[in-house]
């Protein structure tokens, strides 16, 4: 029996990418029951572009965040399966069909989500290629049954939300991890490269580092929550990569203070260890874009680790502060 699919697309200032996103949805090999675009307080031509396509457009002009936008889409959807797609992505044509096939094959599966394609939606230069290749690599390497769901391109049966409720609207980052904490104890989660989308990644180094820092603020609390539940979150960087980056960065101040050649042996060894910890990823970048790009890739990767470590440290300190609302259960938006 053919399952009806509602595609839910949260969109905030997505005029650059929304046309490509919606065109990819309408090009799916599996028929789409309905497309719901939730305009989350955009100030550009997002709504105008959505109206050019056969879709339902929701939004009241207020920016409430991606969790609230997804919840609005869930509440309006009538399909048996909800397929979430970020507005800055374009699906490969058989992604929805493949997701449904995997859901049908495993009745205990509550979410099938996909990977970032190894080519960007638009080629905006080397920083975007770094982000795109890294995003593809770590997701593709983790394909299989996992304990973390990412909803940039994900299929979820309606019954899951009827049982668990919607996304936490107090979160504008890491909402995927919070929902995964509720999802994983009850359903299997499958990550597959049979669902894929080209993504319009950040192409400027400064904003990329700022985004990495901001998301890392919630990294330690998220890992604690997963560990408390006996689960392991999917992460973009291996423990060995993070550890060697920390050792390398920690060796720099003594080398700068002491001067001379000998103190620089420790940073040199740290850099070598960092490259070895990321040998597969760096090799993948070299095969895709050449040796010169691989050197650039390594430098940006280390810079991103610096931002990640800084954000994780600040987030860990913040999580130790007593909170006025400690012990009070967090309210979650019910999805009707």
Image (cartoon, rainbow, N blue to C red):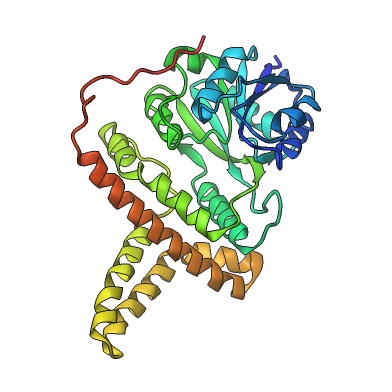
| Residue 201 image position (x, y, % from top left) | 60, 50
Residue 248: quadrant of the picture? bottom left
| Residue 162 image position (x, y, % from top left) | 48, 12
The residue drawn where x is 30% and y is 39% is: 221
Q: Is residue 201 left or right of residue 139?
A: right
Q: Is residue 136 left or right of residue 57?
A: left
Above/below status of 46 relative to 31: below
Q: Is residue 300 left or right of residue 258?
A: right
- Furthest-bottom residue in this view: 260
Q: Nearer the viewer, residue 219 or 209?
A: 209
**How many numbered marks, from 0 up?**
0
| Residue 258 image position (x, y, % from top left) | 23, 84
- Furthest-left residue in this view: 322
Quarter of the figure with the N terminus = top right
| Residue 269 image position (x, y, % from top left) | 34, 77
Residue 255: quadrant of the picture? bottom left
The residue drawn where x is 38% and y is 61% is: 306
Q: Nearer the viewer, residue 321 or 107?
A: 321
Residue 27: quadrant of the picture? top right
């Amino acid at each position: 029996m053919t399952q009806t699919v509602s595609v839910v697309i949260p969109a905030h200032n997505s005029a650059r990418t929304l046309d490509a996103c919606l065109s990819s949805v309408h090009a799916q090999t599996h028929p789409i029951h309905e497309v719901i675009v939730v305009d989350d307080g955009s100030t550009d031509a997002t709504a105008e572009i959505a109206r050019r396509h056969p879709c339902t457009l929701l939004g009241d002009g207020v920016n409430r965040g991606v969790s609230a936008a997804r919840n609005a889409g869930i509440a309006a959807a009538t399909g048996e399966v909800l397929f979430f797609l970020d507005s800055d992505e374009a699906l490969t044509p058989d992604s929805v069909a493949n997701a449904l096939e995997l859901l049908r094959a495993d009745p205990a599966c509550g979410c099938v989500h996909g990977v970032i394609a190894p080519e960007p939606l638009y080629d905006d230069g080397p920083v975007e290629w770094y982000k795109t290749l890294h995003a593809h690599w770590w997701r593709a390497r983790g394909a299989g049954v996992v304990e973390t769901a990412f909803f940039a391109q994900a299929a979820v049966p309606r019954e899951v939300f009827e049982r668990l409720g919607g996304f936490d609207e107090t979160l504008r980052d890491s909402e995927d991890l919070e929902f995964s904490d509720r999802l994983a104890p009850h359903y299997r989660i499958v990550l597959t490269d049979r669902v894929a989308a080209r993504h319009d990644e950040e192409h400027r180094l400064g904003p990329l580092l700022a985004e990495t820092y901001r998301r890392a603020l919630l990294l330690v609390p998220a890992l604690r929550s997963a560990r408390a539940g006996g689960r392991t979150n999917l992460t973009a960087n291996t423990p060995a990569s993070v550890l060697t980056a920390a050792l390398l960065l920690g060796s720099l101040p003594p080398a700068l203070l002491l001067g001379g050649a000998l103190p620089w042996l420790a940073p040199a060894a740290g850099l070598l260890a960092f490259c070895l910890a990321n040998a597969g990823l760096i090799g993948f970048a070299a095969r895709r874009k050449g040796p010169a790009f691989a050197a650039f890739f390594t430098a940006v990767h280390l810079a991103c680790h610096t931002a990640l470590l800084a954000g994780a440290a600040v987030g860990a300190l913040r999580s130790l502060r007593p909170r006025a609302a400690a012990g009070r259960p967090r309210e979650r938006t019910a999805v009707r």
